[in-house]
Image (cartoon, grey):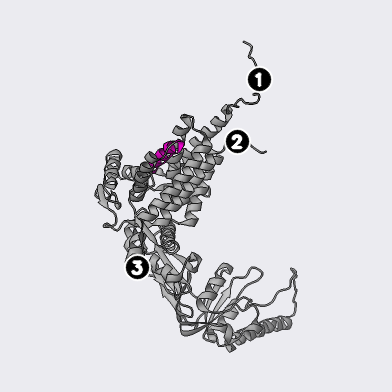
Amino acid sequence: MATVARPRPSNGETLHERSKGKDVRISNIVAAKAVADAVRTSLGPRGMDKLMQLPSGEVLISNDGATILSKMNVLHPAAKMLVECSQSQDVEAGDGTTSVVVLAGALLDACSGLLAKGIHPAMVAGSFHRAAEECTRLLRSAAEPVDLADRGRLVDAVRTCLSSKVVSQNSDLLAPIAVDSVLGILGPDPAGAVNVDLRDIRMVEQLGGTVDDTELVPGLVFDKGSTKTAGGPSQVANAKVALIQFCLSAPKTDMDNNVVVSDYAAMDRILRDERKYILNLCKKIKKSGANVVLIQKSILRDAYNELSLHFLAKMGMLVVTDVERNDVEFVCRTLGCTPIPHVDSCSPDKLGTAEHVGDVVLPGSGHKVVKFTGVANPGMTSTVLLRGSNELVLAEANRSVHDAQCVVRSLVKQRHLIAGGGAAETEASLRLRELALETTGMDSHCFRAYADALEVIPYTLAENAGLKPIEIVTELRKAHAEGRKGAGIDVKKGRISDMYEKNVIQPLLVTTSAIKLATETVCMILKVDDLVVVV
């Protein structure tokens, strides 16, 4: 049967949208929703953990959204946008990385219904942006201000973050450590701080013991013991620390040359000169007043040898070898020392100080670490010594403590707390529905769809806790309609409770950032109407 070509539209006629644009949009929405559904079961304190086997054969256990998605091999471009959205949330707030993806999936589901009604994607995107701004304003008015001096409230917020982690049973220990480690580096005026650099907190992992053995060290810890020969000290009081970047070994030629020595007298002379050269280096270090030497790792030649360690031990100096290049700046800030690139630069003004430096044997493993206590610059840096029975627990504890520190950082940036347990999303959803009734046109439809999508958070929390989600969400909606802004889901007792009384609280920045990032990602996916593959 012959087909008749449609004439091109003349002036005044409307060009109907190509069917390909709809197909691409639906394909993008389906792919992105598949990613959201993959991590949805990990949401909340009763969420499940994911076991991942990496290409290297390494096994990873986590329920952190950003970690799970970063390890997934995602090929679809739209699905990759959700992975990047989760990573953006990780950078901005540190927590809520699963929530932002689940919320984006629910918003995409709402978009499918709106597009099916014939509403243009650009109008949906515009309305969603306005709805997100309105939600942010509503949540800010419902939030409670917090003072950084109120350590108890900060610990409660961190404990809420840790409740959904693998190490949740250790939250009573890890929450105060996370709070104190961040508050300790805010400087002399914590009230005036607007941000905090978490790179000033060093995480040292040490296998052995349990997570309960984790401690906060107000100084510096190296993850291995001191390098010493017989007679070298293992404890030094009133330490003067030198960080050297030159090698305590015999010099080598730039080119790979071989020297053939056939005479014993010549061989003795070479060894004697080498011994004299190294002894001269060690004497110059000793002359500067140092009694603790940190040796930076070298790749060109040996940073030290047995002879140099012997001389340093005889001179009563404690030696820590193989200091990583990346750790040099942190060590200098902590101890107040200056790296010494050449032996002639050794001088007392370049030395750092510490009240005590010594080897410490860790309980439960027998491993040794070097601890520096009473450092020169307290308040500039701190160190968290993490313990765990195996590599999986240790890695997850590290990620959990980092997320907990990010929660405190969020409160430094924006000093407001809001109720957890789905209370914030339910409050925003209810107020947005009321606004939708007062609004006319397409905005009314879109606002209502956006409000329905926000309820995916309490719905999923209830679902993952084994509760009846429809009953719980209906009851939660009723509580908020009666004016109980703090009403949320108590997953332990399986009912609606006041989250402020239960101390289930979270930073406002976590929720508002999740809503903004999820909305931006959804609107970007909505505006795509074609997929161009560039070969």
Start and end of the magenta stretch?
Answer: 441-454
Give the structural element (helix, strand or loop) at label 1: loop
Q: Amino acid at mark 1?
A: Pro
Horizontal side of 318 relative to 486 (left or right) equals: right
Residue matched to label 1: 7
Q: Position of residue 176 (x, y in %)?
A: 35, 66
Give the structural element (helix, strand or loop) at label 2: loop
- Evaluate if marks 2 and 1 touch, with contact meaning CB atoms under 8 Å apart: no
Give the structural element (helix, strand or loop) at label 3: helix
Which residue lies most toward the top here? 1
Quarter of the image with the N terminus is top right
Residue displayed at 53% across by 71% down:
330
Q: Which sits earlier in the primary sequence, circle 2 or circle 1?
A: 1
- Toward which corner of the image does residue 20 lie, by quadrant? top right
Vertical placement of residue 44 versus 349, above or below? above
Q: Amino acid at mark 2?
A: Leu
Q: Position of residue 181 (x, y in %)?
A: 42, 68
Question: Dot 2, how many residues are within 10 Å of its Cα: few (below 14), some (14-19), or many (20+)?
Answer: few
Measure the C-alpha gap from mark 2 to mark 1: 26 Å
Residue displayed at 64% across by 86% down:
280
Q: Nearer the viewer, mark 1 or mark 3?
A: 1
For the residue pair 468 and 326, the one nearer the viewer reads as: 468
For the residue pair 193 and 213, the one nearer the viewer reads as: 193
Residue matched to label 2: 531
Magenta stretch: dominant SS? helix
Residue 151's label in the rendered image is 3
